[in-house]
């Protein structure tokens, strides 16, 4: 979100949390806490990060602070502008624009400039911290993904070895079955030969007995 982009405020919502306001205004939590500390007198709630509930008016005031900072105003100038705005209970947009255009420019002094620079540096620091935290989270997530990928590769390797072992066992079983089958076939052929020889001997013996019987009757 650009600093000059207006914030859409949900006036139907009764209150918003600290986290929701930081997301709505697109600012770091440290920046929002600093704004609350400097401009808390213009807010309707005593804001703390853990228990604050911001009204729509609070969000609008903080959005004005963001816009005025983007225009280069110091915190003192913003406080003066907020005093002027709160002096009129419900200033219209035209009145705000007129007040902004008619108000003479005030040249900030060295102390104000130093404070503005310090605030800007602090804002940049908070943003960098948020970026570093996000990068750390991303690195942690990548670490988990890499570890899961490594675990999957290890499981695939074990599964592949198990399948190869099963294939080896199955091949050995088939080889043994073929050997046993060949042996059985050899035995069967041997038995068939033996039976054939026995049949021939029995037939020869029967024939001899017949011839003997015939000799007795002659």
Image (tube, rainbow, N blue to C red):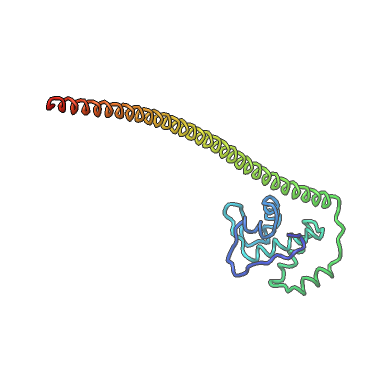
Q: Position of residue 20 (x, y in %)?
A: 62, 58
What residue appears at the point 61 percent right and 64 percent down from the top-left corner? 55
Q: Quadrant of the N terminus?
A: bottom right
Relative to residue 120, is residue 29 drawn left or right? left
Q: Quadrant of the C terminus?
A: top left
Q: Position of residue 214 (x, y in %)?
A: 16, 28
What residue appears at the point 46 percent right and 34 percent down from the top-left corner? 170
Residue placed most toward the observer, 110 or 51: 51
Relative to residue 216, is residue 132 drawn left or right? right
Determine which quarter of the picture holds residue 83.
bottom right
- Relative to 24, is 151 above or below? above
Residue placed most toward the observer, 156 or 32: 156
- Relative to 199, is 17 above or below? below
Residue placed most toward the observer, 87 or 121: 121
What residue appears at the point 68 percent right and 65 percent down from the top-left corner? 60
Relative to residue 215, is residue 142 drawn left or right? right
How many numbered markers are drawn? 0
Q: Position of residue 171 (x, y in %)?
A: 47, 33
- Relative to 196, is 121 above or below? below
Q: Position of residue 217 (x, y in %)?
A: 12, 27
Determine which quarter of the picture holds residue 89.
bottom right
């Amino acid at each position: 979100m650009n600093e000059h982009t207006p914030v859409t405020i949900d006036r139907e919502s009764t209150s918003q949390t600290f986290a929701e306001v930081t997301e709505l205004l697109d600012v770091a939590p440290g920046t929002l806490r600093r704004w609350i500390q400097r401009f808390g007198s213009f807010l309707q709630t005593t804001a703390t990060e853990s228990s604050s509930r911001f009204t729509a008016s609070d969000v609008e005031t903080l959005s004005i602070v963001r816009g005025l900072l983007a225009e280069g105003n110091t915190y003192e100038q913003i406080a003066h502008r907020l005093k002027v705005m709160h002096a009129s209970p419900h200033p219209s947009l035209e009145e705000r624009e007129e007040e902004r255009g008619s108000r003479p420019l005030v040249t900030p002094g060295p102390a104000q400039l130093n404070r503005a620079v310090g605030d800007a540096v602090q804002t940049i620091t908070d943003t960098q911290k948020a970026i570093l935290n996000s990068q750390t989270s991303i690195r942690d997530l990548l670490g988990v993904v890499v570890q899961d990928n490594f675990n999957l590769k290890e499981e695939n390797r074990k599964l592949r070895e198990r399948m190869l072992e099963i294939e080896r066992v199955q091949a050995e079983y088939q080889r043994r079955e073929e050997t046993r089958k060949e042996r059985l076939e050899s035995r069967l052929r041997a038995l068939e030969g033996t039976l054939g020889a026995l049949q021939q001997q029995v037939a020869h013996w029967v024939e001899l007995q017949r011839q003997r019987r015939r000799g007795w009757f002659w």
